[in-house]
Image (tube, helix red, strand yellow):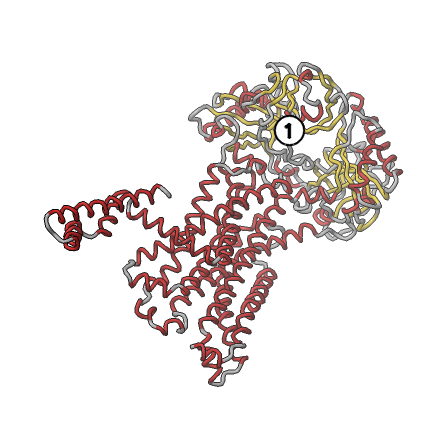
């Protein structure tokens, strides 16, 4: 027996004992036993009222009634398990998707950076808007001046990210490294498991814990020992703690360097040099002093630059200055897509709420007599409303708990499939803020779909509901109109989401539509980056590449092999015989060094002329179609001569010998740029990509090819070994992430909308069975009944679709930054979505319509 029941039992015993004592006293006074008991009861008063009053003192009335409503609601849900399961699953999907997206938004946009005093961190950079990609760097002489003269900062740190070989003792591996200046360790709040940072003014290496465990096998003796990197020895001074990881933006100028964890950090000492010294390029982040604004920082740095320029001449670096919060720089362009996705998933949750409200309204209509009886015996309308809200809260709580599990699963899947699609995506987790959001979403959804059935029944007449005929009348026009309006709203929201998903699908198709002749599915790419004193000379690098090519071409299962330099260098062009133009008006192009077999290896189609030959005797160029169109117009460029600065061979212009098709072989979502190719013997060869076309699966052939080529020189490891189609897919990971999520939202919305149409029409048919029977008894044909039912559903669908199309025309413009070669008002997408919704609405109406047409008028009338 529970404590509450024991208390009530004790109260009952006390009352009974009191009445018995009073009765005995009355008998002692000379009353008969019957009169004595009547007198005792009269003196005590209403026993039930006394118990209620006493219980109200022990437990507040509102809480007691709430507990009663909760128990009754649970019994009702157990009596309708299918209904309860449908509602809970619908909520689990809606709340789960919303929670998963919010957890990503929380990790990327809301949660503070892991740096100490992250709110005072600023990104400082110089840039040239004419350069490729608008690279933001600071040359080391200028960084030294800022560090020594700027008073707005507590610390100013520089870093650069690169990939370089390091000898771990057992093997030479190409590792992701960050070169950092002295103040980086304090600024980042670095925590060490072993050792510590290099001392000021000294160089050294700090290992990440994962790299330390994998390649040094957790041997603590590595701290204090030298390792060889880039052919020189450097002391390992420390190992970072396992959970420590700094948040650094990937470099814009190195398109092949995909986001990944840093393997080791190398201390870099920067000393003051002349302004015309080239030095090294850095990314710079500064910790501002408390109270210093971004405008104040910009003013001070501009003043330092002006003062140094007047005293010593301009620095050898980009001319313009940019200052912005470091968090904004780290997030990059991910803010807008994430907010769009969050808005989209909230729309899906609203559709789920509308669908559940429809289900509850249908269930509430079936409970009309129950509600009428409860009202007739004294239950107020407020008590009835609370009963509906309590039942909705129970459903919402179950759906919220299931949604939280769904969100955890979705996050794990996303992190496993596309961990680098969004900056800071790997930090996504279910924390206190996400839990609070889930609770708020659960409460809000309970209110949204809980009020709908109660409001519909609010003005219902108890007298009408209790009449015997109330079971057979058609549904009230008001209730049916509310349900139809909810479905129309569902459809409108679904149309907006489906149009957005359609536009993104069209963009994705445009991105991944390869030109004729380009088949990356059988191409393996391997990168090599020269380091060490033995490869300072161009001849040594060329000999190493020639040997790599020779071995790759002779490997079993290889059709062709070629080299390419990735095309990172931007050049100024001057066409021989063309009018002389000022420097700022000259055309520019990306210079790529390639071998003779590269075109065949990746399927680069020659449009006119020929491709390069190995060891060209004279300097020659091959240009792509974009360069030919922009520079030569309708003229044939083959045979024309171009001077390319700063690249010049023997001070002479080079002849164009061929034109190739435009090809995006590094990043699929970049537009076509002007590009020219030169023989790889005529360019600086510090980092090259080897492309190998295989007869079978390149991933299966990769280990053997890598082993064969690595034996040329173990100090120059091959890295980023992966099929070309995988590389291209990785280049559009953010777009694929957005498409998958948006497509999931749109598909969920479409499914919910179809269920909503079907539910409304099926319910209307069930409620109008008597009316349909009368119509058919009076001569209505089955096709007329079908037409009536389908017409009702299609009118509702048409209203929703038209409203959705109007909303989509206005709202899809926010997707412009997510689209590629597709306009936000693409007619083909809008037409396809309209046709799709017409088809699914017709299919949703078909089932109830056929059921209505099969109604037997005799049976329908007999039932009444």
Please tell me whether mark 1 sits on a helix, a strand or a loop: loop
Q: Quadrant of residue 454?
A: bottom left
Residue ID at (41%, 48%): 443
Q: In which quarter of the image is residue 841?
A: bottom right
Residue positioned most to the bottom: 779
Residue ID at (55%, 55%): 748
Residue ID at (29%, 58%): 380
For residue 558, above or below residue 166? below
Quadrant of the drawing holding the C terminus = bottom left
Q: Can see residue 143? A: yes
**Would you name the residue on which mark 1 appears?**
262
**Coordinates of residue 490 in the picture (x, y in percent):** 49, 59
Which class describes the residues within 10 Å of circle 1: few (<14), some (14-19), or many (20+)?
many
For residue 531, above or below residue 816? above
For residue 625, above or below residue 544? below
Q: Nearer the viewer, residue 31 or 835?
A: 31
Q: Taking 366 as reference, is 672 left or right?
A: right
Q: Nearer the viewer, residue 797 or 615?
A: 797
Q: Taking 442 as reference, is 658 left or right?
A: right
Q: Can see residue 684? A: no
Q: Nearer the viewer, residue 19 or 742?
A: 19
**Coordinates of residue 825 in the picture (x, y in percent):** 56, 58
**Coordinates of residue 331 in the picture (x, y in percent):** 55, 37
**Coordinates of residue 445 in the picture (x, y in percent):** 43, 51
Quadrant of the drawing holding the N terminus = top left
């Amino acid at each position: 027996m529970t404590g509450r029941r024991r208390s009530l039992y004790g109260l009952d015993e006390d009352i009974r004992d009191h009445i018995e004592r009073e009765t005995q006293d009355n008998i002692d006074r000379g009353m008969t036993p019957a009169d004595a008991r009547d007198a005792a009861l009269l003196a005590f008063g209403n026993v039930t009222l006394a118990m209620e009053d006493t219980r109200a003192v022990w437990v507040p009335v509102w809480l007691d009634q709430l507990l009663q409503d909760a128990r009754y609601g649970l019994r009702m849900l157990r009596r309708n398990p299918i209904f309860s399961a449908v509602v809970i699953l619908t909520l689990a999907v809606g709340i789960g998707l919303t929670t998963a997206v919010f957890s990503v938004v929380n990790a990327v946009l809301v949660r503070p950076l892991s740096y100490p005093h992250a709110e005072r961190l600023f990104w400082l950079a110089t840039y040239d808007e004419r350069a490729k990609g608008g690279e933001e760097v600071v040359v080391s002489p200028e960084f030294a001046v800022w560090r020594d003269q700027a008073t707005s900062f507590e610390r100013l740190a520089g870093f650069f990210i690169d990939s370089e070989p390091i000898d771990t003792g057992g093997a030479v591996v190409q590792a992701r490294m960050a070169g950092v200046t002295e103040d980086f360790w304090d600024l980042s709040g670095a925590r060490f498991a072993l050792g510590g940072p290099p001392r000021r003014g000294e160089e050294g290496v700090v290992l990440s814990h994962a790299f330390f465990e994998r390649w040094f096998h957790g041997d603590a003796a590595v701290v204090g020992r030298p390792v060889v990197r880039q052919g020189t020895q450097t002391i390992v001074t420390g190992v970072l703690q396992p959970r420590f990881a700094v948040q650094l933006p990937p470099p814009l100028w190195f398109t092949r360097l995909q986001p990944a964890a840093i393997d080791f950090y190398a201390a870099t000492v920067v000393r003051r040099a002349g302004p015309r010294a080239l030095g090294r390029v850095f990314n710079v982040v500064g910790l501002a002093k408390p109270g210093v604004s971004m405008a104040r920082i910009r003013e001070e740095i501009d003043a330092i630059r002006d003062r140094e320029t007047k005293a010593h001449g301009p620095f050898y670096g980009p001319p313009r200055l940019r200052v912005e919060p470091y968090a904004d720089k780290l997030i990059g362009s991910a803010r807008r897509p994430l907010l769009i996705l969050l808005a989209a998933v909230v729309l899906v949750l609203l559709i789920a709420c509308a669908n559940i409200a429809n289900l509850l309204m249908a269930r509430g209509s079936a409970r009309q007599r129950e509600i009428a009886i409860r009202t007739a015996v004294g239950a107020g309308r407020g008590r009835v409303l609370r009963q509906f809200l309590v039942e909705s809260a129970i459903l919402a709580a179950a759906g919220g708990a299931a949604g939280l599990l769904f969100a955890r699963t979705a996050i794990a899947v996303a992190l496993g499939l596309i961990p680098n699609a969004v900056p800071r995506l790997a930090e996504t987790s279910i924390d206190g803020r996400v839990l609070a959001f889930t609770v708020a979403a659960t409460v809000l959804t309970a209110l949204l779909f809980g009020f709908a059935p109660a409001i519909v029944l609010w003005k219902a007449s108890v007298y009408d509901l209790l009449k015997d005929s109330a079971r057979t009348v058609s549904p009230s026009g008001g209730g049916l109109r509310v349900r139809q309006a909810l479905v129309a709203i569902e459809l409108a929201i679904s149309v907006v989401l489906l149009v957005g998903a359609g536009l993104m699908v069209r963009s994705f198709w445009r991105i991944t539509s390869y030109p004729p002749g380009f088949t990356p599915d059988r191409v393996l790419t391997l990168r090599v980056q020269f380091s060490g004193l033995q490869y300072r000379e161009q001849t040594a690098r060329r000999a190493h590449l020639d040997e790599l090519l020779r071995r790759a071409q002779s490997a079993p299962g290889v059709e062709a092999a070629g080299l390419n330099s990735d095309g990172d260098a931007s050049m100024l062009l001057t066409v021989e015989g063309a009018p002389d133009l000022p420097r700022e008006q000259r055309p520019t192009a990306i210079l790529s060094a390639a071998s003779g077999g590269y075109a065949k290896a990746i399927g680069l189609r020659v449009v006119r002329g020929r491709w390069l030959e190995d060891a060209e005797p004279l300097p020659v160029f091959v240009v792509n179609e974009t360069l030919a169109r922009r520079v030569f117009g309708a003229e044939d460029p083959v045979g024309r001569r171009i001077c390319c600065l700063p690249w010049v061979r023997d001070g002479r212009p080079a002849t164009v010998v061929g034109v190739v098709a435009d090809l995006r072989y590094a990043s699929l979502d970049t537009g076509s740029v002007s590009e020219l190719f030169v023989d790889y013997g005529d360019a600086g060869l510090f980092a090259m990509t080897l492309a190998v076309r295989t007869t079978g699966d390149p991933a299966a052939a990769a280990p053997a090819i890598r082993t064969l080529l690595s034996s040329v020189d173990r100090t120059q490891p091959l890295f980023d070994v992966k099929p070309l189609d995988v590389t291209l897919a990785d280049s559009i990971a953010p777009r694929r992430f957005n498409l998958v999520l948006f497509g999931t939202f749109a598909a969920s919305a479409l499914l919910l909308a179809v269920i909503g149409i079907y539910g409304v029409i099926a319910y209307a048919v069930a409620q109008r069975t008597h009316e349909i029977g009368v119509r058919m008894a009076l001569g209505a044909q089955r096709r007329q009944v079908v037409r009536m039912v389908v017409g009702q559903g299609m009118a509702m669908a048409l209203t929703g679709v038209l409203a959705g199309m109007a909303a989509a025309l206005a709202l899809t413009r926010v997707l412009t930054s997510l689209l590629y070669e597709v306009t936000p008002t693409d007619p083909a997408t809008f037409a396809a979505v309209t046709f799709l919704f017409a088809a699914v609405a017709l299919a949703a109406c078909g089932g109830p319509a056929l059921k209505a047409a099969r109604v037997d008028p005799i049976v329908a009338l007999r039932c009444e």
